[in-house]
Image (cartoon, helix red, strand yellow):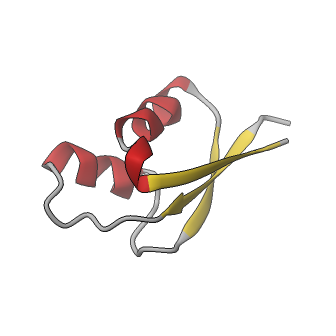
């Protein structure tokens, strides 16, 4: 089974760049406080790194 991350949006997207907004949407997040589970791969790691200041990330097994 692949390793996954629990990602929670903790900051607003107001005033952020379009690339950051796109990264939030691609992770499947829409609202502040929403939490999703994403698979660990280079693409999702890059998106998480791009907006790490807006997220709360936990590693699942």
7 left or right, relative to 17: right
Quarter holding the N terminus is top right
- The image quarter containing residue 30 is bottom left
Of residues 26 and 60, the one drawn nearer to the viewer in this rendering: 60
- The image quarter containing residue 50 is top left
Image coords of residue 16 (percent x, y): 18, 54
Instruction: Name the outermost residue toward the top.
Output: 42
Of residues 35 and 39, the one drawn nearer to the viewer in this rendering: 35
- Give the vertical position of 9 relative to 50 (above or below): below
- The image quarter containing residue 36 is bottom right
58 left or right, relative to 55: right
11 left or right, relative to 6: left
Image coords of residue 26 (percent x, y): 39, 51
- Give the vertical position of 40 relative to 24 (above or below): above
- Give the vertical position of 50 relative to 35 (above or below): above
Query: Residue at 59% across / 66% down in the picture?
Result: 35
Query: Residue at 51% across / 74% down in the picture?
Result: 33
Quarter holding the C terminus is top right
Query: Residue at 78% across / 35% down in the picture?
Result: 2
Of residues 48 and 3, the one drawn nearer to the viewer in this rendering: 48
Query: Residue at 13% across / 61% down in the picture?
Result: 15
Q: Total of numbered circles in the picture?
A: 0
């Amino acid at each position: 089974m692949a390793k996954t991350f629990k990602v929670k949006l903790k900051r607003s997207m107001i005033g952020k760049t379009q690339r950051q907004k796109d990264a939030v949407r691609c992770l499947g997040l829409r609202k502040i406080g929403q939490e999703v589970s994403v698979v660990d791969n280079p693409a999702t790691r890059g998106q998480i790194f791009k907006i790490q200041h807006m997220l709360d990330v936990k590693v699942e097994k």
